[in-house]
Image (tube, coloured by chain):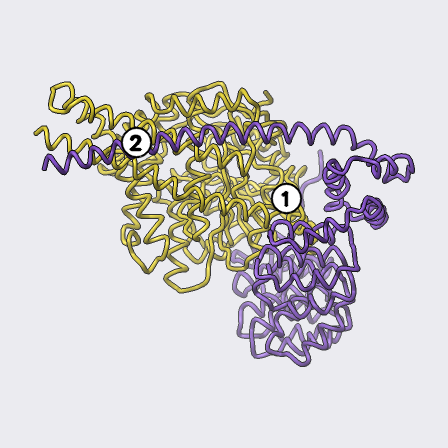
Amino acid sequence: MSLIVTAFSLVVTLYFVSWVTARGVFFPAAAYFVWRHQRRHSVRSRALVDRLASPPLVSIVVPAYNEELTVVDSVRSLLALDYEAREIVVVNDGSKDGTLEVLRKAFELVPAPVSFAEPLKTAPVKAFYRSIVAPELLVIDKDNAGCKADASNAGINAASGELVLITDADTALEFDAVTRGALHFLDDPDVVAVGGNVSIANGSRIENGVITDVALPRSWLARFQIIEYMRSFLLFRQACASRNAVVLISGAFGMFRRDALLAIGGFDPKALAEDMDITIRLQTHFRRQRKPMRIAFDPNPLAWTQAPEDFASLRSQRYRWRRGLMQTLWQHRRVIGNPRYGTVGLGALPYVAFFEGVGAPLEVAGYAITSIAWLLGSLDTSHWRLLLATAFVSGVASTLLAVLLNDLALRRYTRPRELLGLLAAVAFEGFGYAQMNSVLSCIATVQAARGKGGWGEMKRRQFRAR
Amino acid sequence: MTAVLDAFTRLSFQLLQATLVAGALLLIVILVERTTIGFLEFRRRNLERRYQPVVRRALAGDPEARQALLASPSRQQPAIARLLILPLVKDRNPSRVAETRAILRAMSFIPTVLRYLRSRWSWRRALALQVLGVLQVREYSAAIVSALDDPDPIIRSAALDALTDLQDPATLPAIVVRLHDASLPHGRRLAALAAFGSSSEPLLLDLMAVDSQHAINYVQALAICGTKRSLPVLCGLTGDPRPEVCVAALEALDRIGVDETAADYVLAALDSGNVGIRAASAKALRGCADPAVIARLADRLDDVWSVAVRAAHSLRSMGAPGLAALKAREHRPDTAGALARHMLWREPGPA
C-alpha cells in the first residue's frame, strides 16, 4: 500500500514538473512570437488602415443578456473606437432587466423593419431598432435561447460587414482594438479569425468605456485571476499562435471573416464553451478541406473584462468554463492526437486535454490521497513535502515566466508597488486559490459527466471611473 | 520496485531544485529588467519634457530652438529624433515632413539611419526603412526597393510601407510589378498603390495587356487608382470567362463610376448565371437612374438574397425613380417586399 501511494505521489510530482517544463518550452516560442508581432505591427503599420481607400467593414456584434448596468458604457466605448468603417449590432438576448430600455433611452432607438437574410437559425427576432443619435448602431431584440451562441448568430445574420467582431457587453475594447484586429486580415488573406489578448479591468481607470490607466485591483481574488489570464493569454496562446494552432479565441474579443463563420454554420447553440468550440471547428473545417487558413492572435490587450470579485460569481464562471471545456474536448475527441489536423491535433489539443482536462482531477487526487496517507503513516513526510513543494514552486515559476513576458511585451502594472502586488499574488496563489480552482474543476467535471448545462449567473458591476 | 521509486524520488528532488533555481533566476531577471526599464522610462520622460517644447518651436521655424537641437548632446539625439519623427506617422503634412527632414539632416542623423539600414539586425533595418520612408528621403529609394526582396517578411513589409510614404514616382514600377507577390502583405500592397493615386494607371493598363494571367490583380488595383480611362478595358473584362475577374471588373467599374457605354456591359452581367457576378452588377448599377436599368434592378429584388439586397440598395440610391420602383413592391409579403419596406423606411425626425 505504502509503495503504491509513494508511486502515486511521485506521478503527481512529475506531473507538476512536466507542467512547468511545458511552460518553459512555450516561453521562447511565445516571446519570439510577441517580439515579431510587435515589430510587424508597429505604429506605422497601424496607420495603414487609415490610408486605405476602403478598409473592410467590421460589424461589431455585442450579445447582451441582463446587461443594463454595463451595456450603455460598452456601446459608448465602441462608438469611440478609432476604426471608422464599422457598425455595431447589439443583440438583446431576451433580457429580463432593463437592457433594452437603457439602450432605447441612451441612443434614442426607433423601431425599424427586420429585413436581413437569416442563413443561421436562431430563436425568433422580435424587433429591430436603429439609433437616431448613432446611425451605425443596430439593436436586435430577440427571444432568449439560453446561450450566447444563439445571440451571436443573430448578430452575424444582421451583420453587413465582411468581418465580424464578437465581444461581450461587459467588455471594454482598446481604442485601436479593431484596427489592430483588421490589420491581420489585411496582411494575410488566409487569416480567417483573430483572437485578442483579454485583460482584467478590475482596478484600472475607465473613462467613457475606455481604459485610461491600468492598475492592479485591491481584491486578491481579482489579482489571482490577473496572473491566471497572464499565464493563459501570454504563454500558451502565443505559443499556439506561433504554430498556427490557436484552439481558443476568447468570447470577449474574436474577429472573424463572416463567410468563414457562415461556412461552418456559425456558433453552436448547444456548446457551453462556444468560443473554444468555434475556434476548433474553424481549424478542423479548413484543414479537412485542405484550404489555406490561419487563425491569428494579437498579443496586445485588445479587450478588458471584469473578473468576478465574489466567490459565488467566480464559482459559477469556473463551473461553466470547466463544463464547456469537457464538452468541447469530448465533442472534438477525434481531433486529439490526429495527425490530419497538424499542430492542433498533435500539439495544442493534447496539451489542453492532458493539462487542463486531466490535470485538475489528478491534482486534487494527489493532494487528498497523499495527505490522508501521510496522516495515516502510509506515506513518508519527505514525499508529501516533495509533492507540495513541487506544486508550489512550479506554479510560481510558471507565473513568473508569464510576468516576464508581460513586462517584455506589454509593460503593464509597471509601478513598483504593482510589481510587489503582482509578486505577492504569485506567491499566495499556491496557498489555497490554485487548490480551490482544482476542486471547482473536479465538481464541474462531475456535473459535465452528468450532462448538466446552463450558464449560471454572474454579478455585474458598472464600469466606473476610479 | 523500491529501487525504481528511489530513483524517481531522487529525480523529483533534482527537478524541484532545478525549478527552484529557475524560479529564483526569473525573479532576479524580472527585478533587474524592471529597474532598467524604469530607469530608461524615467530618462525618456525627462528628455521629452525638456525637448518637446524646443522641438515644437524648431518646427515652427525658430532658429534658436533649431540651434538648441543641433547643440544637444549626441546621446540625447535618438530621443529627439523620436520626438520629431513619430508624429509624422499620422501627420503627413508635406511642410512638416520637409521641416523635420531638414532638422534631422542638420543633426547628421541620416548617416546613422543608413548605418542601421546596413545592419545585420533585422529590427534595425526595419527601423531605418520606416524612418527613410516617413521622412521622404528620396535619394535612397533604390536601397528601399532592394529591401523588397529581403528574406525577412518584416523587412519586406517595412520596405513597402516606406515606399508608400516616400511616394517617389521612380519606385512605382517596383510596386506595380509586385502586385501579385503573395509574400508581401496584401493590404500593404494596395495601400502602396493607393498612395500614388491615378499615376499608376497607365502602367497597370500596359501590364494587363501583356499579362492576362494576373488580370485580377491589375483589376483590383485599378479599382483603387483607376479613372475613366480604364473603363473600356474593364468593360471588356465583364465578359471574361473567369468569374472572379468578372466580379473584380464590376467592382472596379462600381468604384470608378459607370457611364452610359459601360452601363450596357454591366446590365448584360446582370443576366449572368453566376450569383457573384449578378450581385456585383446590381451594385455597380447604383449610379445609372435609367428607366430600363431601374426595371431590370426591380426584377432582381426576387433574385437570391445577395443579389436582391444589392439591387434594393442601388434602387434606393437612385432617388425618386428608384424609390417609386421600391414603393410598388412594399406591400408584398415576400423578401422583395421586406427589402422594399426597409429601403423606404426613414428614421423619424426629432419630436
Q: Is residue B270 visible?
A: no
Quadrant assignment, res A188: bottom right
- Which residue sits at x=69%, y=71%? B292
Q: Disc 2 is attached to a residue of which chain?
A: B
For chain B, give the colour.
purple
Q: Disc 1 is attached to a residue of which chain?
A: A
- Kind of residue indicated by mark 2: Leu
Horizontal side, residue B191 vs residue A26: left or right: right
Horizontal side, residue A135 vs residue A120: left or right: right
Spot occupied by residue B226 in the image (x, y as percentages of width and height): 74, 67
Q: On the rendered image, what quadrant is the N terminus of chain B found in?
A: top left
- Which residue sits at x=75%, y=61%? B141
Residue on which the image places disc 1: A136
Residue on which the image places disc 2: B16
Q: Is residue B146 visible?
A: yes
Q: Nearer the viewer, residue B95 or B285?
A: B95
Provide the letter of the chain coloured yellow.
A
Question: Is A57 rendered above or below residue A213?
Answer: below
- Kind of residue indicated by mark 1: Glu
In what element is the residue under mark 2?
helix
Q: On the rendered image, what quadrant is the C terminus of chain B found in?
A: top right
Q: Residues within 10 Å of mark 1 (few under 14, many from 20)?
A: some
Q: Nearer the viewer, residue B43 or A218?
A: B43
Q: Nearer the viewer, residue B299 or A70?
A: A70
Spot occupied by residue A148 in the image (x, y as percentages of width and height): 42, 40
Spot occupied by residue B76 in the image (x, y as percentages of width and height): 74, 35
Q: Nearer the viewer, mark 1 or mark 2?
A: 2
- In three-dimensional space, the C-alpha distance between marks 1 and 2, rounded to whole angstroms, equals 57 Å
Residue at far bottom of view: B210
Spot occupied by residue A194 in the image (x, y as percentages of width and height): 50, 48
Question: Is A200 rendered above or below residue B145?
Answer: above
